[in-house]
Image (spheres, grey):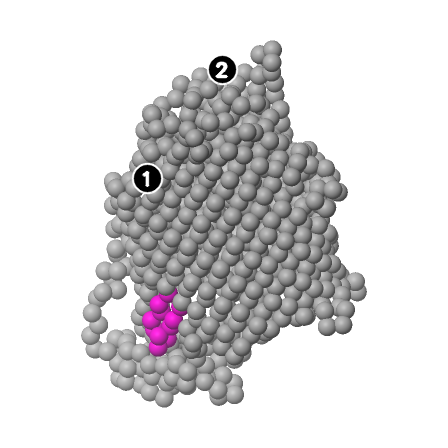
């Protein structure tokens, strides 16, 4: 309780300071223009090292009041212009000030590749932002947004698992967000132990932000991190795109009107050509096949408002022979228990997702954002001869307002309501389900008391109707500019999340789980070079801990309604991370290096003692490089990934001894990926041919071991491996809109 009080007190102080009434006010007014005396709209104008300021309107005019007197400096800043200022002596009201801003040179307008601005103290202080082009040109990512994130600090190589594993957390601890709405099914369905792609194509989004901790009070229900995707705004022009590759074919088109645009597209997927060339580690007796369609409408009713409406539908089916993850389960809770050791698994899946959002800025001072979304996923699985279904849904609504009191002070207030649930079972003897309504409210203040310092306190309240429980999560982050090109920042906060689905489906109602984050970093960025160093400590409390006398390593195990448990589970994660990106030193070359060290242990679930989870490698290294060859119109990309061995459960150890539980390690992980893209035009069609080779050396990476008994009762050990070792992928994309070399 003391720790909670400290966070709440730290959160309240800036609000108390900002409420002090002003006396003896003077009005300051004038105009912001460019070199040609044209007005500049949206410029922040303020007195240096004070809270007093305003924003210029469409005529470039500004006005604000201040209590300051004597010698001051007035400053104006705007994203596309160079910041400028002038001395000012205040003895009374001042009018007629004219501030001239020069247009920024291109190099000064480059997007910062890590963190959202040198003065931003926030959830953003631990965000790594990649543009869509960075994602599609990263070798080994396969244009998959989530795969590209795995080249950044704080993540783990996942192998046969789906999801982002962030700073000691498993995939369930990282939320995926589209336009501020939680995505219920971020990945295509598949067999247990066989990883699938995420549902996100990079060019659907204008920005992808990955927060590995300390994120905004806007979001909850994620103990470790948040992946945010923001969809594109109004399309630039009408165009048509066509594409084909070893996995299928697709087409899309855009129609642009003056104030609106309509996007529509669809595709067909069939991996028969791909698996005809590549040897798989699993027997796909029915290769993955499916289709998708989407439509999206964007409308700008005025210059400061935008409406977005999108509809998406996908279907896919596959059949593969897999090791039965529950073959040795004799608990009686698991319908797969006792079935043969290797079984045929078939799945048919249909997913629907829709989203509508509207954002409006009023008088350059108030902003309103509201959004709603609906998703539904129907999956029919067949394990051997056992038919099983899974259904899940999520309905959401969010409304959020922001008041820009001054250029240095703004307040965000919002609420979100989520209704979601899941059910699974058979038609005869087995059924589990739950339904939840989660209500959240939040507020967050952004305050820049002086130029070098920014403070962002926030607080989030949540109520769970399923658990009949409430939680209050205060968060605070700060940044201090240490030099022209560097800053230090710190963040801390409390992050709650409900127990894993397998407990809720069984009808159990554990308390909310808690992670408390403490983060500090230093960043230097200049002339297309960025260096970032970060350290963190994360404390886990209130984790679900089963009262089990033995350990079952099966992550797909079923929990029965009679399972005994407490919320006595604990754990920690701590580490250091490095990120270096350089787009300057070598002409036409861009490369980055990311390194993470993590020390983490937990006692939760059915663990016998505190241990490092099997999805953790203590050391992770990624080297990513891209080079453009002008004469050949070709881009070459390479990615090398390394990780130390991961823990795994060995039943032949005496696992009642803590030092032997999860003490064995897999071999080290190595992977080299290459990709090539060649640009050519055929009449009006601008075309890109591409080829990618993943795991060039065909290294047999192992992600763990599985133990089972043969017919004679002897224990046999088999490797847990990805579906594919080395892959080769070919494709072509054609567009009526020209590509640039940066789009390769």
Residue at the right extreme?
631
Whether residue 295 is in magenta: the answer is no
Q: Position of residue 547 (x, y in %)?
A: 36, 23
Residue plotted at (49% across, 68% down): 297
Classify 10 Å Cα crowding around label 1: few (below 14), some (14-19), many (20 and above). Answer: many
Q: Is residue 651 above or below residue 688?
A: above
Asked if residue 506 shows in the view, the reply is yes
The reply to whether dot 2 and dot 1 touch (C-beta < 8 Å) is no
Please say whether residue 363 is one of the residues in the magenta stretch.
yes
Position of the C terminus by quadrant: bottom right
- Whichever of callouts 2 and 1 sits on the residue coming sooner in the sequence is 1
Left or right of 221, for residue 388: right
Of badges 2 and 1, the one in the foreground is 1
Residue in the picture at 43% in, 69% down: 307
| Magenta span | 359-369
Task: Determine the main secondary structure of the stretch shown in magenta.
Answer: strand
Looking at the picture, how far across and down is residue 245, in whole percent? 70, 53
Left or right, residue 552 beside residue 140:
left
Q: With respect to residue 89, does 409 lie above or below?
A: above
Residue depicted at x 76% and y 65%: 680
Which quadrant holds residue 421?
A: top left
Residue beneath label 1, please? 512
What residue would you read off at disc 2? 654
User: Would you say 664 lies left or right of 68 here?
Assistant: right
Please state which of residues 543 and 239 is positioned toward the viewer in this rendering: 239
The Cα atoms of the two marked residues, 2 and 1, are separated by 33 Å
Closer to the camera in the image, 542 or 484: 542
The count of marks equals 2
Residue 337 % position (x, y): 49, 23
């Amino acid at each position: 309780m003391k720790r909670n009080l400290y966070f709440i007190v730290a959160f309240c102080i800036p609000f108390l300071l900002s409420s002090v009434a002003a006396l003896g006010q003077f009005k300051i007014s004038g105009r912001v223009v460019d070199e040609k005396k044209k007005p500049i709209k949206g410029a922040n104008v303020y007195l240096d090292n004070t809270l007093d300021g305003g924003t210029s309107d469409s005529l470039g005019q500004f006005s604000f009041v201040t209590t300051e007197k004597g010698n001051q400096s007035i400053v104006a800043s705007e994203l596309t212009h160079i910041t400028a200022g002038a001395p000012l002596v205040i003895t009374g009201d001042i009018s007629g000030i004219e501030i001239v801003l020069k247009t920024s040179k291109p190099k000064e307008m480059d997007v910062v590749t890590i963190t959202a601005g040198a003065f931003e103290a926030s959830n953003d202080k631990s965000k790594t932002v990649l543009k869509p082009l960075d994602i599609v040109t990263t070798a080994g990512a396969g244009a998959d947004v989530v795969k590209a994130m795995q080249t950044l600090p704080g993540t783990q190589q996942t192998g046969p698992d789906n999801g982002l594993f962030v700073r000691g957390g498993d995939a369930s601890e990282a939320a995926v967000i589209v336009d501020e709405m939680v995505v219920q099914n971020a990945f295509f369905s598949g067999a247990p132990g066989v990883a699938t792609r995420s549902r996100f194509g990079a060019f659907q989004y204008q920005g992808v932000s990955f927060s590995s901790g300390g994120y905004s009070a806007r979001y909850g229900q994620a103990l470790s991190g948040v992946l945010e995707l923001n969809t594109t705004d109004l399309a630039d022009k009408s165009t048509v795109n066509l594409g084909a590759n070893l996995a299928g074919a697709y087409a899309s088109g855009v129609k642009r009107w003056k104030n609106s645009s309509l996007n529509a597209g669809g595709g067909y997927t069939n991996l028969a050509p791909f698996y005809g060339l590549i040897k798989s580690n699993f027997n796909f007796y029915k290769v993955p096949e499916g289709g998708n369609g989407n439509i999206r409408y964007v409308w700008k009713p005025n210059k400061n408002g935008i409406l977005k409406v999108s509809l998406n539908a996908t279907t896919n089916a596959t059949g593969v022979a897999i090791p039965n993850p529950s073959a040795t389960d004799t608990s009686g809770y698991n319908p797969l228990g006792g079935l043969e050791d290797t079984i045929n698994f078939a799945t048919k899946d249909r997913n629907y997702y829709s989203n509508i959002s509207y954002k409006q800025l009023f008088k350059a001072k108030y902003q309103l954002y509201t959004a709603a979304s609906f998703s539904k996923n129907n999956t029919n699985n067949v394990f051997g001869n056992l038919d099983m279904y899974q259904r899940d849904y999520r309905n959401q609504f969010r409304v959020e307002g922001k008041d820009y009191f001054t250029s240095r002070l703004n307040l965000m207030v919002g609420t979100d309501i989520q209704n979601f649930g899941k059910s699974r079972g058979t038609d005869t003897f087995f059924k589990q389900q739950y339904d939840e309504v989660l209500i959240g409210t939040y507020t967050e203040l952004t305050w820049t008391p002086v130029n070098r310092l920014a403070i962002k306190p926030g607080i989030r309240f949540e109520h769970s109707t399923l658990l009949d429980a409430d939680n209050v999560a205060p968060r605070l982050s700060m940044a201090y500019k240490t030099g022209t090109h560097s800053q230090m920042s710190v963040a801390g906060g409390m992050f709650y999340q409900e127990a894993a689905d397998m407990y809720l489906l069984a009808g159990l109602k554990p308390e909310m789980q808690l992670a408390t984050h403490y983060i500090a970093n230093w960043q230097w960025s200049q002339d297309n070079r960025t260096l970032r160093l970060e350290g963190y400590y994360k404390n886990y409390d209130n984790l679900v801990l089963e009262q089990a006398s033995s350990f079952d390593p099966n992550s797909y195990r079923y929990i029965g309604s009679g399972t005994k448990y407490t919320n006595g589970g604990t754990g920690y994660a701590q580490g250091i991370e490095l990120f270096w990106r350089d787009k300057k030193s070598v002409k036409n070359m861009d490369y980055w290096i990311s390194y993470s060290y993590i020390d983490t242990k937990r006692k939760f679930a059915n663990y016998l003692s505190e241990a490092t989870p099997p999805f953790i490698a203590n050391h992770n290294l990624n080297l990513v490089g891209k080079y453009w060859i002008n004469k050949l119109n070709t881009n070459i990309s390479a990615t090398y990934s390394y990780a130390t061995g991961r823990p795994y459960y060995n039943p032949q150890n005496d696992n009642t001894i803590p030092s032997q539980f999860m003490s064995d390690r897999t071999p080290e992980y190595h992977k080299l990926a290459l990709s090539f893209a060649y640009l050519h035009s055929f009449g009006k069609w601008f075309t890109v041919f591409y080829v990618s080779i993943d795991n060039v050396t065909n290294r047999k990476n192992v992600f763990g071991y599985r133990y089972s008994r043969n017919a004679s009762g002897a224990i046999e050990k088999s490797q847990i491996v990805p579906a594919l070792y080395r892959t080769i992928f070919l494709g072509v994309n054609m567009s009526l809109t020209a590509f640039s070399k940066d789009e390769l």
